[in-house]
Image: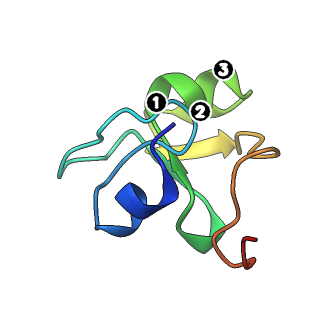
Amino acid sequence: MLPRDEREEGLNVCFDCGLELGLDASHAFAGEGGVQVCWDCALKRGGVFDEDADEWRVIPDLSGLPDERRPHA
């Protein structure tokens, strides 16, 4: 995972594996607080995407990922 300061520079990256998502993150999952994970990490975390409805039917488990709303020591 990329260090926090690199994420804050506006890079669109997966908070789990650090993969740069690029400008088109259409298959990434964006959670609360700006936390986002790439397609592969979302699926590994139990997410289920419905292509026909173009939505996540089962939200990936984002536990253990940083929550940018909390201050860090």
Residue 2 at x, y percent in the picture? 45, 43
Q: Amino acid at mark 1?
A: Trp
On screen, residue 43 above or below 10:
above
The residue where tag 2 is placed is 42
Which residue is drawn at the image coordinates 80% and 44% (left, top)? Answer: 64
Q: Quadrant of the C terminus?
A: bottom right
Q: Amino acid at mark 2?
A: Ala
The Cα atoms of the two marked residues, 1 and 3, are separated by 9 Å
| Badge 2 density bin: few <14, some 14–19, many ≥20, Cα 10 Å | many
The Cα atoms of the two marked residues, 2 and 3, are separated by 6 Å
Given contact means CB atoms under 8 Å apart, are the residues at marks 2 and 3 in contact?
yes
**Element assignment for label 3:** helix
- Residue 59 is drawn in which quadrant? top right
15 or 39, which is in the foreground?
15
Given contact means CB atoms under 8 Å apart, are the residues at marks 2 and 1 in contact?
yes
**Element assignment for label 2:** helix
Pick out the residue farthest to the left. 23
The residue where tag 1 is placed is 39
Given contact means CB atoms under 8 Å apart, are the residues at marks 1 and 3 in contact?
no
Pick out the residue farthest to the front. 73
Residue 19 at x, y percent in the picture? 37, 32
On screen, residue 4 above or below 71:
above
The residue where tag 3 is placed is 44
Q: Amino acid at mark 3?
A: Lys
Marked residue nearer the N-terminal end (1 or 3): 1
31 or 10, which is in the foreground?
10
- Residue 69 is drawn in which quadrant? bottom right
Residue 12 at x, y percent in the picture? 31, 54
